[in-house]
Image (tube, grey):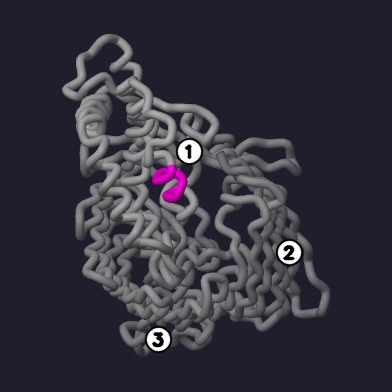
Amino acid sequence: MKKTLMAGLTGALLLGSMGTSFAASNPFTDVPKGHWAYDAVEQLRQDGVIEGYGDGTYRGERTITRYEMAQMIARAMDQFDEQVKGLAGQKPVVQNVGADKAMLDRLAAEFADELNNLGVRVSNLEKYSDKITWGGKIEYTYTSDRRDEDGNGHKTKTNDNHYVFRLEPNAEINDHWSAHARIDIDGDMKHDATGDKDDNGDFDGKVSGKRVWAQGDYDNFTIKAGKFELYTNENGLVFDDELSGGQIDYHAGDFTVTALGGRLDMEEDSQLADALGTTNGDDVANVWGVNLQYAHPTGFELGAGYYQLTSDMLALGVLKNGNVVTAGDDKSKIWSVNTGYNFTDRAKLWGSYARFDADMYEPYSIPSSAKYSWQAEFDYGTYDDASEKGQWGIYGAYRRYGRRSSIFPTGDGVDWGQKGWEVGVSYAPMKNVGLLAKYFNGEDLLSGNDAEKLFGRVEFFF
């Protein structure tokens, strides 16, 4: 987990003020007015290497010490590589790379002693600094689900008013490993109740530990162990849930290979379990899978995936002579492909396809509503979790969530076992505040009856 460099430098300054000696001459002496370093730092700021000066540092109106100057140089060196790379598919943030690099080298040579002392002090200080950071969000979501369940042209309306208070602590373990969690407090505003409804229609009122995992970050590997997000490269077509187990990502240039395995709760919030009407004594599936993803910096991406789930529940729900029976095979195999292209830093077209291997169930019949899933979407805009005021985005999509090929799809608009069109818009009226609206119009795959959904959300990030 990356530390905030300036926090460490502030701590180092405090240690220095307590009388610790420096190898260099007094770093608190002033940098004389007219010294070339002032113009150099200002030029780096204008070129985008330094994003502002930070509190208490030089803005052109006062003389600063060699220590303060070293702080700014250290900050610039820390940010330079990241700023030069820019974002995928975009031009680098820093335009005068060669000149700025030479300027940084000259500054580093001039203030070498101060930078050396800062490096030692920051490294030592990190052992005692606060290793836990907190983030999270508050969100309110309104949905109006409208379905023609009887096929008579009359839609039954079900409205939901839901809120979530979410905490996401992250803690450093050592240079490579960190600990993470997600804690959710859910509530229903319509009934003024905390928690979700259970099978009896009552609200359970529980605080949910949704995710707890340890993560190791190495040069070419990322390792996760515990209960973590299961969101594979089909963008919510097959899985958008949590997995208890392990995952390894191997990065090689533009390629990423992912291997995952663990256990998946098939009953909790699973419409598949509801549709089958029983879990046949086992509501947990053993899951393993592999992904291969290629993402080129210019914006082209292509990937494939394969998953196998094993559970007693999966042997249910096949058809024989028009009746639902137990097939006897408790495995489900799903394979997928995905692709996408960034036309600009604002415009992207992408799609994914997943298919359920039904051959293993012969001579039983798997309905066509279950066999395959696909989606295609066009996104345009700048919205990124309301990180800046004025961000916005729009999208249009067509989705088909097959009843056996989409196990836990995202389902904000199109729901499990449905197909149709979905459109959405997002806007940040102020920093860290987002407004989202979605609309779906389509039909139920099994019955062919009309379905519709309205979705609205207000989210506050912290």
Q: Position of residue 425 (x, y in %)?
A: 69, 65
Which three-letter amino acid code belongs to the residue tagged 1?
A: Tyr
* The label number, if any, that marks residue 364 in the structure image: 3
- Extent of the magenta region: 39-44
Residues tagged 2 and 1 counted as in contact (Cβ below 8 A): no
Residue occupying image coordinates x 41% and y 80%: 300
Cα–Cα span, label 1 and label 3: 69 Å
Closer-to-camera residue (387/364): 387
* The label number, if any, that marks residue 8 in the structure image: none
SS of the residue at dot 1? loop
Q: Determine if residue 333 is in view.
A: no
Tell me if residue 12 is in the magenta stretch: no
Cα–Cα span, label 2 and label 1: 45 Å
Please tell me whether mark 2 or mark 1 is closer to you in this view.
1
Quadrant in the rendering for residue 35: top left
Quadrant in the rendering for residue 74: top left
Position of the N terminus, as image quadrant, is: top left
Q: Position of residue 114 (x, y in %)?
A: 25, 30
Closer-to-camera residue (87/30): 30
Which three-letter amino acid code belongs to the residue tagged 2?
A: Leu
Question: Which residue is outermost to the top?
Answer: 19
Mark 1 or mark 2, which is nearer the start of the sequence? 1
* The label number, if any, that marks residue 454 in the structure image: 2
Residue occupying image coordinates x 30% and y 55%: 101
Question: Main SS type for the magenta part?
Answer: helix
Position of 461 relative to 409 (above/below): above
Q: Determine if residue 106 is in view.
A: yes
Q: Mark 1 sits on what residue? A: 53
